[in-house]
Image (spheres, grey):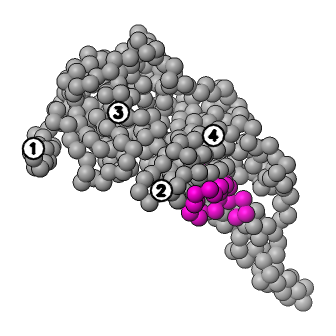
Amino acid sequence: MFKNIILLIFIYLISCGGGFKDYRAIPIDQVDFLTDSETKTEDNITVTTSVLTETESKDIFGVDLSRKGIQPVWISITNNSDESYAFLPISVDPDYFAPNEVAYLYQGLFGGGKVHPQLSDRFNNYGFEFKRINPGETREGFVYTNFDPGIKYINITLAGYTTFETFVFYLVLDDSEEEFEKIDFTTIYTENEITDCTSENKFIQTIKELNCCIKSGPDGNDIYPVNFIFIGNNEDIFSALIRRGWDVTEPYSDKWKRINKKEYFSSPLFRTSPMGNYYFFDRTQDVSLQKSRKRDKGTLRQRNEMRMWLTPITFNGKNVWLGSTTRDIGTDVDKVKDFLTKKIDPDLNETRAFLAEDILVSQSVNKIGFIGMQAPSGPDNPNKNINNQLWWSDGMVLVLHFDDTPNTLSEIDFYDWEFPDEYIRRYYKNKIDSKPGE
């Protein structure tokens, strides 16, 4: 009899969606979460954004979203232009969470598979309403993104009937355990230190005069070759990278020394874990980015890394960034220095090709080219890095020219410079020769 009563209660709770916990929260207008917000205005459109700290997130939603790997980003858009725009949340995070998806993570023990009603209302009411923003309108709310500790790049893309508007924000989070320095890219060089190349020949010559490789220290050994160059406005470049899922990397700090081995290999938050500091222009990389190819325990071991330096070179007034990209395919214990060291794919031509394909899909590139900077190497005559791992490259540097208007793959133009191999040379040459009027 007693068992039957328990069964009836169990069925009742499932059918009624009972068993949900009460999550108390502070009214949003009583939480001062806009203190560290940033605002930008372009073409009569004003965008304000702020990333909730873990404390603010608990206050507003009544739950610790960081434990679920979720970070709410507040976005407010005021359209004072003459055109209507649609906000594309996927530009903020390609893997953002829907409001009910977040609430479902907190379903009760006897919730019957239903989303939490209290949290569902809260996440939906506070979420950004994805409707067209007409002239004179303001829309605002949260986008539920993947958690990024310490530093967060936020890309906001608005699609009009004939144009796109892009806003890129670089926020340092106040509740981080460590100190993060926000770099002002406009102050790295003085005006007198910048060389503007107004011809392709001058640009190629200036690039070839640079060191071929990034180094282990200011006076250290060569580590990896420079294998990519980005030309364009900073917002166009970083907007494309964010849309393609490249994450900002945390600096190495004491926090990472305190993390146990099991967590190091398993936490999904480690898609932003530190990478080593290397040198070019006598300084460590200005930007560290990584793209994990997995969101589970393989996050750390299967990622592509990118280190970037702003150069004192401009090309027809556009910024020039250079860097090196590698593909992590495994990890080993480093018995000499660090807790872990990575295994890289030794074929850096393959890694460079991945970067090219990945960024071209963003439709932000309007021209591509190659410049030879290093002596070629291969499996029969490989190079070695400081961890005694092999790598080889054909010596070519990928050059991508970014634009502020979308370009399909068929619209991409080519610099008739140097090419990685004869097959690609023939392919590009045919494309160049087939241009009308040329």
Q: Which quarter of the rendering shows the C terminus? A: top left
Q: Amino acid at mark 4?
A: Thr
Q: Secondary structure at mark 2?
A: strand
Q: Which quadrant of the view contains residue 273? A: top right
Residue that badge 3 annotates: 231
Q: What range is drawn magenta here? A: 124-147
* Residue 404 placement (x, y as % from top left): 39, 44
Which label's residue is closer to the chain start, 2 or 1?
2
Where does residue 110 sit, x and y in percent of width and height?
Answer: 78, 74
Crowding at mark 1 (Cα within 10 Å: few <14, some 14-19, many 20+): few
Q: Nearer the viewer, mark 3 or mark 1?
A: 1
Number of numbered discs: 4
Q: CA distance from mark 2 to mark 1?
A: 34 Å
Task: Please tell me which of labels 3 and 1 falls first in the chain.
Answer: 3
Q: Which residue is mark 4?
A: 39
Q: Which of the two discs, 3 and 2, labels the residue nearer the N terminus?
A: 2
Q: Which amino acid, by three-letter code, is at mark 3?
A: Ile
User: Mark 3 vs mark 4: which is more N-terminal?
Assistant: 4
Q: Residue at x 13, y 48 (%)?
A: 435
